[in-house]
Structures are given as C-alpha cells and as structure tokens.
Amino acid sequence: MLELKHIKKYYYVGDSVTKALDDVSVAFRSQEFVAILGPSGSGKTTMLNGIGGLDIYDSGDLAIEGKSTKDFSEADWDAYRNNSVGFIFQSYNIIGHLSILDNVEMGMTLSGVSNQEKKEKALKALDRVGLTDHIGKKPNQLSGGQLQRVAIARAIANEPEILLCDEPTGALDTETSDEIMQLIKELSAERLVIMVTHNPDLARQYADRIIEFADGKIQHDSDPYDEHADAEQFELKKTKMTFWTALKLSFNNIRTKKGRTTLTAFASSIGIIGIAIVLALSNGFQAQINKTQANTLAQFPVTISQTATSTTGGANSNDKVKTSKSNQVKAKVSDADKATHTNKLTKGYLNYVKKLDSKLSKNVTYTYSTGMNLLREVDGKAKTVSFSNTDSSNANSASAMSAAMANSTGVGVSVYPSANDGGTTFLKKHYKLLSGAYPKGANDVVLIVDRDNSTNINALKNLGYSVKDNQKFNYGKIVGTTIKAVNNNDYYQSLTTGNYVPNKATTSLYNKTDNTTIKIAGILRVKSKSSENVLASGIAYSDKLTQNIIQANKNSKIVKAQKKADSNVITGQNVDNTTKKTLVSYLGGSTTPASILIYPNTFKNKDKVLSYLDKYNKGKSKADKVIYTDMAGTVSSLTGGLMDAITYVLVAFAGISLVTSMIMIAIITYTSVLERTKEIGILKALGARKKDITRVFDAETFILGVGSGALGVVIAWLLTFPINIVLQNITDLSNVAHLNPVHGIVLIIISTVLTMLGGHIPARMAAKKDAATALRSE
Ligand code: ADP
C-alpha cells in the first residue's frame, strides 16, 4: 500500500509560485491500474516523480507499506527507486550508446546483481515485451514502439512492485499505443501501475481506476482506496555501482564520439608531449655534459705541484702606473715572481689528501721527479734507455733529469693513476687497445699512439730503436719488449773521490737478478679527440712503478751520499739546497711527490674537492698554504648552470601547456555533463546514487587522462627520432633525446591524475543535478 498524505510541492520562479501539488492525499492498492488524467501543467508528472522518489515533496508524507519516508536518506531513496519502482517515460529515455541488453540490465547493474542473473532477468523481460528477435540491434535501429518496449523491459526487469508510466503512448501512433497499453495492462496484474495520461479514452479503456487532476489538486477519484485492502511487504536493497561498470558506461559513451575524443586527447596530450621531450632532451644533454665533464676532468685534473702560481699573488695588471717624478731607480719583484708559490707537500698534507672522500674522485695520481736506470738489450748488447719522449740525442743525466721533471708538470704526463686495478679502467675509458694487452701490474707499461697511429719519435729513439721520421713498422716490434730497471746500488759505482759514476751498460749488469723486468704490454690508441691530451704519445706507465722504484732506491748508497754532500755526487759541482733536493728526488731518495693530480668524477664533486683542499689552508700562514691549479675551472660553472636554467625554462613552458590542457579537460567534461543531463536523470530514475554518477564521469576523465597521457608519451617518443637526426646534423651529438621509460610512466600517471582532478568538479556538479529536472531536459 502506497499513501500520499497532504503532499505539497511548490515551484518558485522569480516572484511567481506554481503550486504543482497542492495538498494531495491519496492511497493506492498493491495491485491495480491507476490512470491519472488531467490537463497539461496540472501537476501529474510532479506527483508521479514524487511517488517514484525522483522529486522530493516539500511537505506532507509519502508512506510505503505504512512506513513514513520523511526520514529517508538519499541512499534509501536510491534503493527505493532501484528496487521497488520502474519508470516508463513518454520519450523512452533509452541510453543511445549502450546496447539494448545493457539498457535493460542497467538497473540491475546499479544494484550489483551478478552478471548471469542479470542477463537471465533481462532476457526474460525482453521476451515478455516481445523483443527477443531484436536483441542484436542498436537503439537507433528500433522503432518508437520497440524503444518503448525496451523501456518497459528495463522497468520490469528487476521485478518492481510499482510501475510508474508518464504518458507512455504520447509519442506513438494509435495502433502501437494499443499494443503498449495492452502490455502495461498485463503487467498491472502483478503490481501497482500508475499511469499519467491526458487521453481519457485510453484511461477508460484500460485502467481500473481514474484519478482526475487539475491545478495540483485531485478533482475526482473513480475508486478510492479501501482501508481493508491487503498489504504487501517489500524491503529495500542498497544500490551500488562498481568502478568497472562506470568505466564500461563511459567507454561506450566515448566510443560514440570518437572524433571529438581523439581531438581532445590529442590537445590535452600536448602538455605531456612538451614535458616528455624536455625530459628526454635534458636527459641526453645531461649525459653529454657528464661525458664532457669526465673527459675534461681527465685532461685537466686538479693539480698540486711543488711550485704553483698563486692567482691572488700578482698585482692587478690593470692598475694605472703613475709616471715617476723621482730621479732614483726602484728595485721591484716581478709580478710573475710574486705569484710563484712553493708548496710544502709535507707528510701532513699528503695524509690530508689521502683522507679525501674516495667517492668524489675517480683517481688520485702522484708523480715523482724520479729517474729510472733502464737497460735494454739491442742487437745482443745492453744499452741505456729511457721512457722520456724528449729529444736526448746529446744525452746526459742532467737532461734526463729535466725530462723526468717535465713529466711532473701536470698536463701531458705519461703517468697514469694505477688506482686499484693497475689503471686498466682509466686506460680503457680513453684508449683503445691496438695490440697486446692492457697492463696487468706496475711492471707493465704501454705505448700511446695518436689517432693516426703515430707516436713521438723521441720515445722510440730513447728506447733504443733506430727509426727515421715517418718510418712505419709492425706492432710486434714493440709489444712484448722487455726493459730492465737497475737498482742504484748496482747501477752506480762509487769512486775513491767519494763521487759516483754509472756503471757501463753490460750484459752482466742487464742480467743482475735483483733487476726489475718491465714489459711493454700493449699499444693503445686515443679513442676520441677529447682524450687526446690525457697522456702524451710515447711510453706511459703507472704511478705505482715509480713508487716501487723509490722504495728500492731510497736507502741506496748514492742517495745517502747525496743527502749528506753539498755538491752533486756525480759531477762534483757545488749545489744549493733546492738543487740538492731535486737531485735526491731524481735518484729516488724522496717519497714526496712532485705533484698530486686529483681526477674528480663530476664538476659538482670537483667543487667539493676544492673546498676540501681550501679547508686545509684555513688559518695557515701564507708560506704554509698549499695552492692548487684548477684548469677545468672556467668550463664548469658555465655548462652546468646554463643547462639547469634552460631545463627550468622549458619545464615551465611545458607546465603551462599542461595546465592549459587540464583546464580544457575540465571544460570538456563540463560540456559532456551538460550533454548527458538526460542520461543522468535516467540513471537516477534507475536508482543510481550520487557517487555512481560522479563515478561515471570520473571514469570518463580517467579514460581520457590515460589515453592522452599514453598518446603524449608515444608521440614524444616518436618525435625523439627526428629530433636526434636534426641535432646530429647541427651539433654532431648522437642520440641526445632519449625518453626514460620510467619518466614515460610517471607522465601518464600525472596526466591521469591531473585530468581526473580537472574533471572531478564537473562530475560532482553532474551528480548533484536534480533527477526530475534532469529528466525534463531535452
Ligand atoms: P503535467 O505533468 O500535469 O503537465 P507538471 O507536473 O509537469 O504538469 O507541472 C506542474 C506545474 O509545475 C507546471 O506549471 C510546471 O510548469 C511546473 N513545474 C514543473 N517542474 C518545474 C520546475 N523544475 N521549475 C518550475 N516549475 C516547474
């Protein structure tokens, strides 16, 4: 039993009040066919919507089975519409983008009925209305009468107790009208049917009871409710729609407007494309910069030599020199001399450098101005040779000494850092193996050649090869060559005068058992232009070899003698303190390196290395300060900072386009909401909750967001190919643009989240729409 008690519903438009329902009281039996007759605008639809829970009354009460609906929550109304009421409208209200079966199933879909049960019930309902043969058709392939049958099937599929029909035959011809009326009449045998019509003939022909309406009031009731009628129980099941159903609904809707959706997705993907390309490019540039940095730093390590040029010591050359008016000569230390600083590489300082964080630098190399006593067997005879690549045609120990010292100036040294692996990693980075093998230990040395396979002729001559300019010979002549390093005690012979002379280079000296055997392990060629100056062409060896030789010679007789003497123990010349130090060092008596070369791995870390070195000088007197040379300094801040700035600007631009596309999505969703107002009404009539409606639109923006994100990433990825070709032509750099897959996935997620955010507000607005008003819209 359904009862309306003093129901009022007023509409206020401007200053005027429309009393659509003006104190209506009426009761219905659980099973009867009621026709509501009345002129247009008399409030019939308003009452029907009120009974169906589409439009909530202003005052009065609607009692269902004696239960008041005054305290009904929204969820209760949703459940009531979904379970107990079926709606049939004049305009059928079939959702065009869904199949016939989906339309009929929708009410049950909303209440979460299992797929199988849903299908069974829907097919039964379609059979009941005589549409079994047309199930495969699309809604737009059906006639009006057939569409109304679909609507009836939808209304009865869930077996509701109440069927509400609003002018069900209003849009149909007489013959079809009769068929539909017949069908409704049949359905009224099992339930309460309330039909609004303004056709008195139809009402009289089919209805059991006629209620006449005018001006929001009941004028006449042909068969008023009898108090003692039977009552039927019904319970409310809560409705719910899964996100999956929402997705399906949205997907079908999107499918019906492919063109527009594609355009929208493309437009909103532009922001993503922009960001993806900026990321791809900055990835590539960053990699390129890192490579350049590493190469630059390998060529220009931070150098700490025994003598350094202090950049702050010299006077500013821009200072104006005033013309002197005095008649005297002024003695002055030159600017260059002022700037020269002697670094005290004390044990303390060396320990300080050793404590440098090993993560900051790839290698730390120590060079020593130590000579080596080398012999090689040439044509069966032992011969004095050297690893120097300076011209030593008029060889004497003094020039050998200067050659050894030239090796310690920093750039172009032929000493490579041995690190933990004998220097292999360092060499592999810059050099390609032409023949032989990379060094396996300190006693393996290599020959460095330029990209045209040329090498310094002096290096070969100093090794005892007789070669002419431009002469070519096979790798095999060099690879595998052995050289003996002779200890000072074997190499020098003391004279009675207290002086020392080198022994003659003899086979017996060559064969001394405590000689160190050194091997030319391989020939290495410069890999790229940027590696050209890492090592000078000629023989290169690891710093470990020098260290070993110092260990062997530091307590030798000649070293001890030279440390005591005030003259050169070989030539007998008197020497000052500095020269004496150099001599001791040359003979292998000093463990103090001539220079320390630090190879930071990045410019950022180089700055950390420098500030670590600066910290040592804090609070030290000028003489105790250790000054380093940073030749890579000028390059650093430029490239790094510039790249960062460019990336920020580009990301900002791409961000703007992302925001633009988000706003666009919001607009599109909003239009879609407006367009689908009717559908929202239908869904609500079928018992959809606010949440469900929001879900449908959220699902739509979700699809759009994923779609445009994926589209954007794919387009950006495709664009990296032509971009790389263009960049290669302009800059010679290959594969600069490289889209990281992780970035791609993150961008799709960002696009989805932003799109859903942009669409969520219109979706909420859609959900809030009043169901009755939504249904009235066209
Ligand atoms: P009927 O179904 O008998 O033609 P309705 O129930 O549709 O009548 O309308 C009753 C009255 O309420 C009409 O005057 C109509 O203009 C008015 N009305 C209906 N809905 C609204 C609304 N949302 N806003 C303002 N007036 C409304």
Image: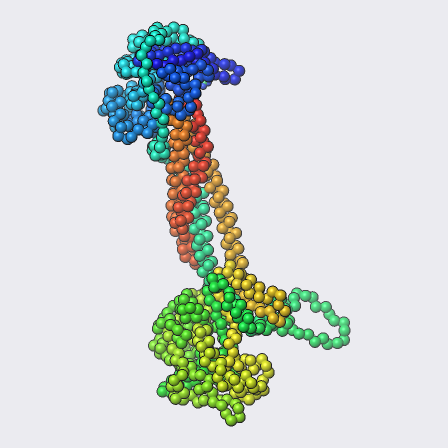
Q: Quadrant of residue 325?
A: bottom right
Residue at figure coordinates x 25%, y 23% from the top left: 124
- Along the line of sight, the residue nearer the viewer: 555 or 179: 555
Residue at figure coordinates x 39%, y 17% from the top left: 67
- Could you say where residue 711 lies in the image, as x and y percent from the top left? 38, 42
Quadrant placement of the C terminus: top left
Residue at the extreme bottom: 496
Residue at figure coordinates x 40%, y 83% from the top left: 514
- Along the line of sight, the residue nearer the viewer: 239 or 677: 239
Instruction: Decide if residue 302 is in sight here.
Output: yes
Quadrant placement of the N terminus: top left
Residue at the extreme right: 326
- Could you say where residue 709 lies in the image, as x and y percent from the top left? 40, 42
Q: Quadrant of ligand 1?
A: top left
Q: Is residue 298 above or below residue 545?
A: above
Q: Is residue 669 above or below residue 503?
A: above
Instruction: Decide if residue 720 is in sight here.
Output: no
